Image: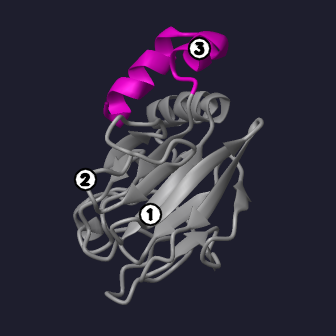
Amino acid sequence: MNFATLTAIAAQLTEAGFVGRFPHPILLVRKSLAQAEAFDALDWKGRTHPSGFNTSTGSHSDRHTPPAPASVELLVKSPRNPFGAMITVGRAPNNDVCFTASSVSKLHAYFQQDGNRWLLRDGTSSNGTFLNGERLKPNVAVPVEDGAHIAFGPDMECLFKLPGGLYRYLKQVAAEGQAGAKPKE
């Protein structure tokens, strides 16, 4: 599923209907920073990549059109992942969320649900997992809130959205896109 399709679905549903259809958290994934200059960047968290690309200012293209993330990843279990209580993120094909960037470890990090909250752990990755700009300690669970900025190494940045928060974000993007403004996170 892509961002435009998700936005169109949100436009047709109430929040309860949307949450019923998409009950799982979602990662809005931006392209790897090495490729990010080629598209309008979302205002993630102010951070400069070694290439000089500043993720808070984005590229030099038109900043009035709300950009779409490179991909939308549902945080759901896949049958290819043998770890029952974990939603894994990494480069290996048996992860629930697979990224091909070489800076992402084979089993980079994983999410777990604890009641109605979500936890994130770095899986002893080579390049680290970052939550809101802070590097996570390996194998230490930290709570993840709606709207959190997550980076899997230096090249993959994501925005973590819970279903209700995603619905409101999509509605805001659509409304502000029509008005020519940039959406808030």
Tag 3–tag 2 contact (CB < 8 Å) = no
- The image quadrant of residue 63 is bottom left
**Which residue carries the number 1 mark?**
157
**Which residue carries the number 3 mark?**
20
At label 2, the amino acid type is Pro
**Which residue carries the number 2 mark?**
93
**Eye-nearest disc, 2 or 1:** 2
Q: Residue at x 52, y 22 (%)?
A: 22
Helix or strand or loop: what does disc 3 sit on? helix
| Number of marks present in the image shown | 3
Q: Is residue 63 left or right of residue 116?
A: left
Helix or strand or loop: what does disc 2 sit on? loop
Q: Position of residue 74 (x, y in %)?
A: 44, 37
Helix or strand or loop: what does disc 1 sit on? strand
Tag 3–tag 1 contact (CB < 8 Å) = no
In magenta, the rendered stretch is: 1-23
The secondary structure that most of the magenta stretch takes on is helix
Looking at the image, residue 105 lies above or below residue 184: below
Q: Is residue 112 left or right of residue 47?
A: right
User: Is 39 in front, or is 159?
Assistant: 159
**How far, Cα to Cα, is label 3 from label 1?**
27 Å
Tag 2–tag 1 contact (CB < 8 Å) = no
Q: Residue at x 64, y 50 (%)?
A: 147
Q: Position of residue 157 (x, y in %)?
A: 44, 63
Q: Position of residue 122 (x, y in %)?
A: 55, 69
